[in-house]
Amino acid sequence: MPNHIKMKKFCCDKFQFHYLGESNMGLNFRVIKLSKDFIKRGQMNIDRSFMITDGYSNHAFMESKHIVMQYCPFCGTKLNSFYKGDDYVQEVLDIPKKK
């Protein structure tokens, strides 16, 4: 296991398993940082979002099946309080540019 993974702390073993799981199998947990423009526009009043999606093969996750969550479904930890560092962020969500 790479050193940067060993250093991360997770709220529980089950969350860690799904966070580190294969990107194309089963359900995946995603930690998404929201851009300042996204937050300013009033979409959400937090700087990150936690989602369960049906894999990473479809990066347009807003068009795929997903669940937004606030608490770990395994241990009940409030995710926004526990996962504060950017080293957990897997992608940044921005407002789509108008064509």
Image (cartoon, helix red, strand yellow):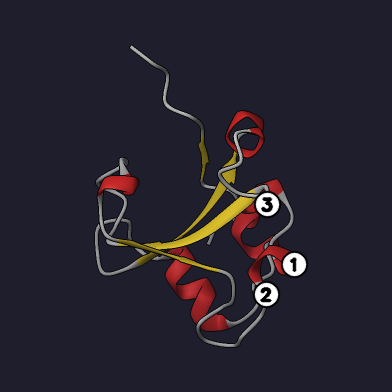
Q: Residues within 10 Å of mark 2 (few under 14, many from 20)?
A: some
Work out which residue is located at the far bottom of the displayed protein and give it.
75
Mark 2–mark 1 contact, CB under 8 Å? yes
| Quadrant in the rendering for residue 78 | bottom right
Judge left or right: residue 74 versus residue 27: right
Q: Nearer the viewer, residue 83 or 13?
A: 83
Q: Which mark is residue 25?
A: none
Question: Residue at horizontal 24%, vertical 64%?
Answer: 25
Choose the circle earlier in sequence order: 3 or 1. 3
Q: Nearer the viewer, residue 7 or 78?
A: 78
Q: Which residue is mark 3?
A: 46
The amino acid type found where label 1 is placed reads Ser
Q: Which mark is residue 81?
A: 1
The amino acid type found where label 3 is placed reads Ile
Question: Residue at horizontal 59%, vertical 41%?
Answer: 34
Mark 2–mark 3 contact, CB under 8 Å? no
Q: Nearer the viewer, mark 2 or mark 3?
A: 3
Could you tell me how many numbered marks the image carries?
Answer: 3
Which quadrant: the C terminus? top left
Question: Residue at horizontal 56%, vertical 78%?
Answer: 72
Judge left or right: residue 6 versus residue 69: right
Choose the circle earlier in sequence order: 2 or 3. 3
Q: Which residue is mark 2?
A: 78
Work out which residue is located at the far front of the displayed protein and give it.
42
